[in-house]
Image: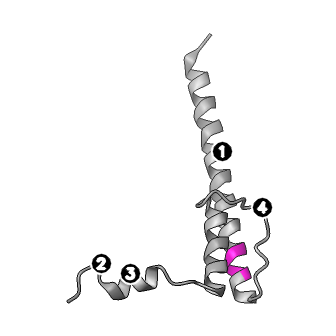
Amino acid sequence: MEPVGAPARRGTVHRPLGAEGTVLAALASVVGIGGGSSDVEPGLDDEAATTVVAAVRDAVMALEAVRQRRTVGNASFAHVWRGP
C-alpha cells in the first residue's frame, strides 16, 4: 500500500489535462469554482461533454430558483408573523 502523497499520485496531479482540462474547467465554471463566468460558452468539441455541461448548468439554475423561492417564502412568512 502506498501513502497518499506517493510520487505516482503527485505526477498525475501536475500533468497537463489537455481536452479533459477544458471539460473540467467548463464544469468548474458552471458550478462557480475558480471565479470564471458561467455565462461564457466553453467551446467544447465533444457533443457528449457539451451535453453534460449543459445539464449541469440547467441543474445549477434549477437549484438557484429553489433557493430564491425559499428565500421569498421565508421572508413572506416572517413578515406575516411580525404583525403591524
| Residue 29, position as x, y percentages in the image | 66, 65
The reply to whether discs 3 and 1 touch (Cβ–Cβ < 8 Å) is: no
- Residue annotated with mark 3: 10
Residue at coordinates 72% horizontally, 61% vertically from top-left? Answer: 38
- Label 3 vs label 2: CA separation? 6 Å
The reply to whether discs 3 and 2 touch (Cβ–Cβ < 8 Å) is: yes
Q: Amino acid at mark 1?
A: Arg
- Badge 4 crowding class, 10 Å Cα cut-off, few under 14, some 14 to 19, many 20 or more, is few
- Badge 2 crowding class, 10 Å Cα cut-off, few under 14, some 14 to 19, many 20 or more, is few
Predominant SS of the magenta segment: helix
The reply to whether discs 1 and 4 touch (Cβ–Cβ < 8 Å) is: no
At mark 2, the secondary structure is loop
Q: Earlier in the sequence, mark 4 or mark 3?
A: 3
Q: Earlier in the sequence, mark 1 or mark 4?
A: 4
Q: Is residue 81 left or right of residue 68?
A: left
44, 61: nearer the viewer? 44
Q: Is residue 54 above or below residue 33?
A: below
30, 71: nearer the viewer? 30
Q: Amino acid at mark 2?
A: Gly
At mark 4, the secondary structure is loop
State the residue lying farthest toward the left. 1
- Label 1 vs label 2: CA separation? 44 Å
- Residue annotated with mark 2: 5
- Residue annotated with mark 1: 69
Quarter of the figure with residue 20: bottom right
Residue at coordinates 69% horizontally, 84% vertically from top-left? Answer: 49
Q: Amino acid at mark 3?
A: Arg
- Label 1 vs label 4: CA separation? 22 Å
Q: Is residue 17 left or right of residue 10?
A: right
The C terminus, quarter of image: top right
Provide the residue span drawn in magenta. Answer: 50-54
